[in-house]
Image: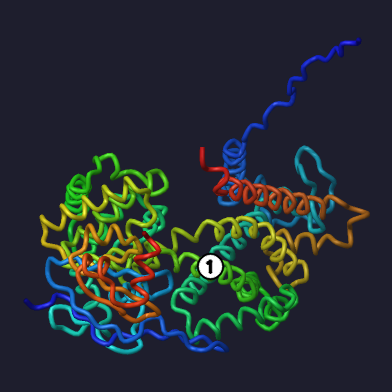
Amino acid sequence: MSVENRVPSVRKQKIKKNHTKTRLIIFLILALALLLVAIFAQQLCPYDPNAQDTAMSLRPPSAAHPAGTDRFGRDMFSRILVGLQTSVLATLSLVVIITVIGTAVGVLCGYYGGIWDSVIMRISDVCLAFPGLVFALAIAALLNGGLHNAVLALAVISWPKYARIARSQTLAQKSVNYIAAAKLAGNNSIQVIVKHILPNCIGPILVTAMLDIGTMLMELAGLSFLGLGAQPPVAELGNMMSGGRSMLQTYPWVIIGPGIAIFIIVVIFNLLGDTVRDYLDPRNSRK
Amino acid sequence: MKPVLEIKNLTKTFVTEGKSDFTAVDHVSFQLYPGETLGIVGESGSGKSTLARIISRLIDATEGSVFLDGQDVTEIKGKKLRTYYKDIQMVFQSPVTSFDPRRSLGDGIGESLRNQGLSKKEAKKEALCLLQQCGLSSEFYERYPHEVSGGQCQRAAVARALAVKPQIVICDEATSALDVTVQQQMIELLRELKKERNLAYLFICHNLALVQMFCDRVLVMKDGKIVEEGTPDEVIMYPKDEYTKMLVKSVL
């Protein structure tokens, strides 16, 4: 008779720790640092970003010019900092605009319903059915380029997504009894919306907005790349890449610098958005 | 005695495209007198809750009218409607979802008072007082709906309903989601409050035993119509209508 020599197996794998909060703090700090850099770009620039010096044109990165110089001898590092300011601030204002407008439209449509709801939702269907960037291109071209117009063009095509989310959230909340209770407590419609519906449907909207920052930055840079966004000599990451696109093989730093900047911004904001989503997930919050 | 609430010929028809119309409440008339507890019983889908929602003006009636103290309130809107809600309040079936998940219970109880112009401080004082009357300690002021039990939450809901000192409280299956002992406690609470404040209850329920214990008068509803009316003992001991007989039988 053989006795099996079995060693009792102990689970060696550690139970996965929840690092969401740490991640949130790290990415918030990173995003905040990025914002600070964007806000104080002018103060941080070692050189005037628009000062031309043809004698110094297209120099590779060195101690004096950490990111090299461009065709006109302008310091790339300074231009990237200022370009980052233009891009980030334009993107943030764009995301704030579409979030506010989309949410307001969606919540009002969901709450009141009726004919306006149908009309506005059909308009948003049209916007969603169209390839967004193409539509934005058309609008931006119609408005004659410029950073403001590019933001406007992207705002026009991007709000329906938020309106959709806000509307469906509102519809879900509207039928729950606490809204009826809020009415019985003597709130008028505006009070019901502001005090009860908005706070209960803002979570998913905020997460979408966070995740959209990266996308919007790229779309804005894309419009600028195509010459429909920021116009030279304004430094903007998209048009800087556009200006350097013929020199990728000969003077790569002219295009790689802004590219890396875009990459870093998009990654930080996307990771922040992901983390905020995880953090707000109800499965995560109950202890 | 003049009725505090009078319902005349109330009808609600739901119209859905592609489906035949559905009449949830069909020409219902009754009176509610001050200090009276009127029970409404009937199976699910008999129109009890729809009736409650019409009376509390959460939905509009198709036909008929509701009178409060002789005043027609069937179509009031805006400011007048908010004045109406000082006289009539409601306790809902599921206590937890009747509170805003992002606000504390105390906040919910004091909300109607703040809307009437009380300061935050006064509203809090009043809310704490109401919590105590409903048998909850002051620590519940800060609690959120998901942090308390169903029974405790329903007590808070009663406190909220009473905050504006209404004449009428509609209890829409207010005890159905609670377990039996807690149901008993709720009935005791409602009884005490009624004695103190001379409240009139519209007590919607499908538990006949509870109705027999608690109500002065009872209406039996079926398919949106009132099929029988009387004191609970009359209705339960000597039911006249076929449906009431069935209802009583199903419990025994």
Q: Chain of mark 1?
A: A
Q: How is the image coloured?
A: rainbow
Would residue A41 be found to the left or right of residue A3 on screen?
left
Q: Considering only vertical position in the picture, is A36 above or below B25? A: above
Determine the residue positioned at 49% across, 68% down.
Answer: A170
Q: Secondary structure at mark 1?
A: helix
Instruction: Report how many numbered discs are placed on residues in the image.
Output: 1
In the image, residue A76 lies at what x, y percent?
Answer: 75, 51
Would residue B9 be found to the left or right of residue A195 on screen?
left
Q: Quadrant of residue A187?
A: bottom left
> Which sits in the foreground, A236 or B240?
B240
In the image, residue B202 lies at what x, y percent?
Answer: 24, 68
Determine the residue positioned at 34% across, 66% down.
Answer: B248
Determine the residue positioned at 28% across, 63% down.
Answer: B171
Label 1 crowd (10 A; few <14 / some 14-19 / many >=20): many
Amino acid type, label 1: Ala
Residue at which label 1 appears = A166
Q: Quadrant of residue B246?
A: bottom left
In the image, residue B181 lies at what x, y percent?
Answer: 32, 45
Q: Residue furthest right?
A: A249
In the image, residue A85 lies at what x, y percent?
Answer: 62, 55
Quarter that holds the N terminus of chain A: top right
> Which sits in the foreground, A281 or A208?
A281
